[in-house]
Image (spheres, grey):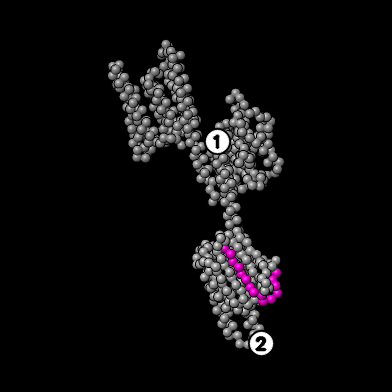
Amino acid sequence: MGSINNRMIAVMRLVMASAILLIFFLDSTWTGQSVASPSFNILIFYTLFSLVLYLFEFYERPLIPAITAHWVDVGWYALLIAVSNDVNSIYLYGFFFSILIASFRWGFKSGLQVVIVSAALFIIIGMLPAPVRSELPLNQFLIRPIFLVALGFMIAYWGGLEIKLKRRLALLREVNTLSNPRFGVDRTIGSVMERLRSFYEADVCLLVMSDLHTAELHLRRADRRDPEKATHAQPASEQTLARLTTLPPSYGVVRRGRWCRWFRMGKDCHAIDLAKGTRVDIQDEKIEELATDLDASSFITVPLRYRNEEVGRIFLTSSRPVFESSDVSFIVQVFDQVLPIIDNIRLVDRLALDAAEYERQKIARDIHDSVIQPYIGLQIGLSAIRQKLHLGIDVTGNVERLLQITGEEVADLRQFVSTLKTNRGRSENLLPAVRRFADKFGKASGIKIHVEAKNEICVNDRLAAEAFQMVAEGLSNIRRHTESQQAVIEMSCQDGQLTVHIKNYGGGDAADTSFVPRSITERAVALGGRASVRQTLDGGTVVAVEIPL
């Protein structure tokens, strides 16, 4: 917790003991006193004791627990003052070493305890010889413990403040770690609430927060007995939510408890207008009602703002007065970091859902074009074979042809599955792939297909795969919905646009130009383009696809 480690404390203890021993020796030489006094012997033992502690710390085998080491030093200096029988000796300043260690390592409370105990021991030890010394100057004697308490209190406060600031910085770093998109919004909010509750050792952490996009209020609760509870919104009535949001939207409130009113000789509740940064008065009745609703004698509540809008309010409750006015701005700072991350996590989740939906639609279109269409062709072929069988016509050649087509389609299906597994599109050039498919399709359907291109088609793999599927769907529609025996595929890539025209020439009634193939249209729109159908002069149709590059 503190800023110094055990080895450094051991070094400082040894330096302190050696310095006092040297000062005693020099002072005794100057005044002609004997070094054989009990104080000198105890100083030697204390120095040796400090050396032993340092050696154990050097080899990382502590002899005394760190939480009690400073109390041992207090005992040594109290013994030195008692044995020397001199309250004016230098040993008084040894107490400050223990105060420093306790304050900067364990906080204000520990430092203040050492201050009080040290001052009490000094007074008791100094007053014990009073009956023998009737001339004891009480006014001069009290100067030292008063100085010890005053300076010790400041040291304890500064030490506790340093630890508090370091703990706050550690919490901010931890909050940034907890705010990870892979955990999701609910887990992130719940983890931050539980960590904040644990930081203050509070009983409950409540969060009334509106959705950043729907503005719907939700209530979350992190409880000491159930830390995981905050990961899910709790059911709450509109009346409950209204009572928890009755405070002015810019007010942060700290209520320490009724007993603080007498102890601090002032109000037990403070309200801060965060918009103005000043303390304001607030009705005691409103605070008492809020304390009753929260079932807490001490609480802190802070409004949450995001993009200059109020999005909720957080409450921390405790049975002990653990909150201070400075905690209001700190909690605001915590959520100033958390709320943008939560919004980003929501955005990432939405993008992931949209991407998943897009992939589902794309796979559905691919299955329609790459899987269902060949089976429709096989079904038509099998129907023709059945009719020939009824007429007694030899179907050996037809069966062989269907088997060949089946083998080719199985190979295409395997390539389709491989593409899904590797998440890669067609790596080959689009134009040769279309020509091979047109040749195979023409042989299977009897439709004469021409593929024309004004220039080389150079597009990325994803666009090539989508354009290939649109050509396949267009040719399938010609076979199913027309009696045309000839089709032309025109492709061009120029002026920042990929254009694909799928034409059929007559062969039946005029096509309905109000009909646009859904699969082709969906693919074109998904790529930022468009698809249209127009009629040719000979009664055929042209499906035109234009995709910007």
The residues colored magenta run 498-512
Residue 151 x, y percent position in the rendering: 46, 23
Residue 65 x, y percent position in the rendering: 42, 36
Membership of 6 in magenta stretch? no
Circle 2 residues within 10 Å: few <14, some 14–19, many ≥20: few
Q: Secondary structure at mark 1?
A: helix
Q: Nearer the viewer, residue 361 or 342?
A: 361
Residue 478 x, y percent position in the rendering: 64, 73
Q: What kind of residue is marked 2?
A: Leu
Residue at screen point 61% across, 36% down: 302
Residue at screen point 55% across, 79% down: 404
Residue 211 x, y percent position in the rendering: 64, 46
Q: Which residue is mark 2?
A: 391
Q: Nearer the viewer, residue 176 or 104?
A: 176
Instruction: Measure how far apart labels 2 and 1 are at the Cα level.
Output: 90 Å
Q: Is residue 226 above or below residue 144?
A: below
Total number of numbered labels?
Answer: 2
Q: Nearer the viewer, residue 95 or 303?
A: 303
Q: Which residue is mark 1?
A: 330
74 sits left or right of 202 in the view: left
Decide if residue 528 is in sight here: yes
Quarter of the rendering containing residue 298: top right
Residue 314 tag number: none
Q: Secondary structure at mark 2?
A: loop
